Image: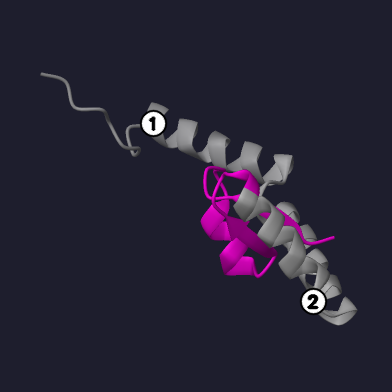
Amino acid sequence: KPTLATFAVDPDRKIMEYGAGLLVEANVDQIRRGIEQLEHRSLAELGEMGRNAVKLVSQEYDWTRTASSLLQLYQGVFSGRGSRVATS
């Protein structure tokens, strides 16, 4: 299923990048318009948006991938290769 989200959510640019749905302002009128826009899309377009939404989640928010990235970050920090926070 396609995504209808507001610009206030964290992955807003990812939703657009992946073509996973529509973004609207966080108010009742804009959400209603977003729903109406989705209602007028073809089943093929909606299906493509839905597949893109699944792809977005599996590629960007997979726990295994996230854990691996964090592990690499921590290993870099502890071995002295990672970014350091400047102290005054």
Question: Which mark lies nearer to you, 2 or 1?
Answer: 2
How much space separates mark 2 and mark 1, taking CA atoms? 48 Å
Q: Nearer the viewer, residue 44 or 69?
A: 44
Relative vertical location of residue 30 with respect to residue 82 in this rendering, above or below: below
Image coordinates of residue 47 in percent, x first then y, are 86, 72
Q: Nearer the viewer, residue 59 or 70?
A: 59
Q: Can you tell which quarter of the image residue 79 is in? A: top left
Span shown in magenta: 1-28
Circle 2 SS class = loop
Q: Determine which of the numbered discs, if any, sits on residue 35 in the image.
A: none
Question: Within 10 angstroms of label 1, few (less than 14), some, or many (20 or more) residues?
Answer: few
Image coordinates of residue 2 in percent, x first then y, are 78, 62
Discs 2, 1 touching: Cβ within 8 Å: no
The N terminus sits in image quarter: bottom right
- Left or right? Give the position of 21 relative to 51: left
Residue for point 35% across, 37% down: 82
- Left or right? Give the position of 62 relative to 1: left
Relative vertical location of residue 24 with respect to residue 86 in this rendering, above or below: below
Circle 1 SS class = helix
Residue for point 57% across, 49% down: 11
Residue to which mark 2 is pinned: 41
Q: Can you tell which quarter of the image residue 88 is in? A: top left
Q: Determine which of the numbered discs, if any, sits on residue 77 in the image.
A: 1
Q: Is residue 6 magenta?
A: yes
Q: Amino acid at mark 1?
A: Val
Residue for point 39% across, 31% down: 77
Relative vertical location of residue 38 with respect to residue 84 in this rendering, above or below: below
